[in-house]
Amino acid sequence: MFERILVCLDGSNNAEQILTYATAQAEKFKSQLILLQVIVNEITIPPPEWPSGSGYIFPTGIPSKDYFSVELELIQQEQAKAKNYLEGIAQKLNKQAVETVVLQGNAGEAIVGYAGDTDIKLIAMSTHGRSGLERVVFGSVAEYVLKQSALPVLLIRPMR
């Protein structure tokens, strides 16, 4: 029934609580687990200001010509960190058929897009448990996935 289960993780203990439920489903249906982490598109150094003249140095000490190479390096470091994290989780689940995937972009859009493009049968994820104004301000990846995906979604609210 659920040959391929997409397990959405973000590196937090709250997100990892879905693993118990996802692995139970995988065992029951003899499914493959796909562990997914999305690197969110966020610039971690100040954006460039493009003044006239050459040799401008950003407040961080990064020469303007090197700004984009530094940003690329930071993204590559985040991708490697995410891949190592997912591989560590996969090793703990050695009884399961497990694949790891790291994507970059908007988390909700990346999850829905990947699931739609790769024959996923179930999306498993946990919420962050936000409510009220905090949810309005920060949004909800889980809510986006529920609304935008045509697939079944196994969603839990983590225990704190």
Image (cartoon, rainbow, N blue to C red):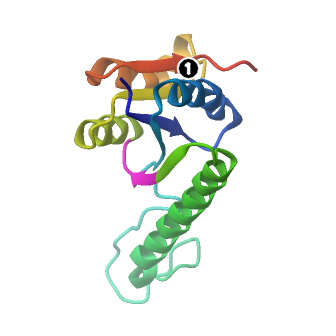
**What are the residue bounds of the magenta stretch?**
101-106
Find numbered disc 1 in the image and state the secondary structure of the residue it sits on: helix
Q: Residue at x 64, y 34 (%)?
A: 16
Q: Quadrant of residue 60?
A: bottom right
Q: Is residue 116 left or right of residue 108?
A: left
- Please say if 81 is above or below 110: below
Tag 1: amino acid: Glu
Q: Between residues 69 and 142, which one lies in front from this camera angle?
A: 142
Image x and y of residue 110, in percent: 34, 42
For residue 64, which quarter of the picture? bottom left
78 relative to 116 in the view: left or right: right
Residue drawn at the location 53% of the way across and 14% of the way down:
133
Location of residue 98 with respect to 19 vertically, above or below:
below
Query: Which quarter of the image is occupied by the N terminus?
Result: top left
Q: Is residue 89 magenta?
A: no
130 horizontally vs 145: left or right: right
Work out which residue is located at the far top of the displayed protein and give it.
132
Q: Is residue 27 above or below residue 155?
A: below
- Res. 52 visible in picture: yes
Q: Residue at x 51, y 74 (%)?
A: 58
The image quadrant where one finds the C terminus is top right
The spot of residue 79 in percent (x, y) is 50, 62
Q: Magenta-highlighted stretch: main secondary structure?
A: strand
**Which residue is disc 1 drawn over?**
134
Left or right of 92 in this view: 53: left
